[in-house]
Image: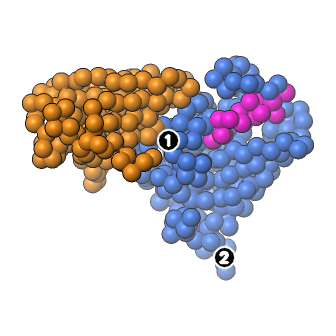
Chain colours: A orange, B blue
Amino acid sequence: MDEESRVVGIAEMTVAQSPQRLVAFGLGSCVGVTLYDGKTKTGGMAHVMLPSSRLRSGEAPPGKYADTALGILAAEVEKAGARRGNLEAKIVGGANMFSDLPQSAPVPIGLRNVDAVRQKLAELDIPIAGEAVGGNRGRTMVFNLEDGRVEIRILNQPMQYL
Amino acid sequence: MGQEAELFNDFQLDALKEIGNIGAGNAATALSQMVGRRVDMSVTQVQVLKTDGIAAFLGGIEQNVAAVHMPVYGEICGIALVFFPLDRIGELCGMLVGKREDDPFVLSEMGQSAIKEVGSILTGAYLSALFRLMNLQMIHGVPGLVLDMAQAVLDTVLVELEQKEEIAIVIETQFLENDKKLTGSFFLLPETGSLRKLFNAFSKTLGLSGNG
């Protein structure tokens, strides 16, 4: 980790600008979502845990849920100087890591997270420029605000880029 | 550390250590029977950690592990995990099935089952010890095995429990066969409602035992 890199923890959202990097370590069924405006080199990342805030009990940070996180992140990124019309999204994660067990839900939570993120992005009219989702492996993602590139590390596999 | 100090006091940690010692003794007997050779186990440390401290406990945020995971049902519901460092998995297979495996990503069926079984034995032994000392009745479900980044396993467990942060009881156990040593770490992550029950059980049992 260098000083330009900032970690986005579970249920957190962070806005950044070039030359910073945002990192989400070990996404399992969580989903990392980046928003990026290539013109102003401004963007942000959310580390979403669950699809919907409607089922929540008690207080919870908005960054935890796909339906509440992305609208706030888009607004924050705009506030930092990005143009809404320039924003593009990339989404990473949503794996079903415990796939060898009998599933308690008909659709694994990772995939429901991915669906909820896609749906919210469509609502916000933000196009998806790249995806690395599903499967059964954990992913670490590094978002470089210099060029918007997302680097994906999976254990024992070659590096991927979006 | 110090982080766990706010969560459990010394008496409670001592009780947890006792649970660990009883559990490790029983697990060693069960494991020795399974492999047909004598394997000893001892508790090297017990802790109560917040989930954001688990990766550091295991050796860093990018630590790779073999993780046996099991649902836990009963008076305490939650998830049990047994972590082994990924780079020691070949040796662990050697200890368990008598044949060392070189690449953890192409483990034999036999090797995989053996690792799941060890996770299951360890979990069963610690849950029984919790029952004997704290009178908390629990059983665990079928074990699954993943080889991945520790952080990704924790991420998935937190999503399952729908918590952004959790408290985990950790019992670090050393396996000894002749001169070979291996460490496995048992984690119990109770659901939010169950956590209070667990704390209450500890307070009550220790309170009843008099001077602590």
What amino acid does circle 2 point to?
Gly
Residue at screen point 27% across, 51% down: A61
What amino acid does circle 1 point to?
Gln
Q: Is residue A124 visible?
A: no
Q: Are marks 1 and 2 in contact (CB under 8 Å)?
A: no
Q: Quadrant location of the C terminus of chain B? A: bottom right
Residue at screen point 53% across, 36% down: B149
Q: Quadrant of residue B63?
A: top right
Where is residue B207 shown, x and y percent of the image? 60, 74
Front label number (1 vs 2): 1
Where is residue B75 shown, x and y percent of the image? 54, 50
Q: Which residues are magenta?
A: B82-98
Tag 2, which chain? Answer: B
Q: Which mark is residue B151?
A: 1
Q: Which residue is mark 2?
A: B212
Q: Residues within 10 Å of mark 1 (few under 14, many from 20)?
A: many
Q: Judge left or right: residue A120 versus residue B161.
A: left
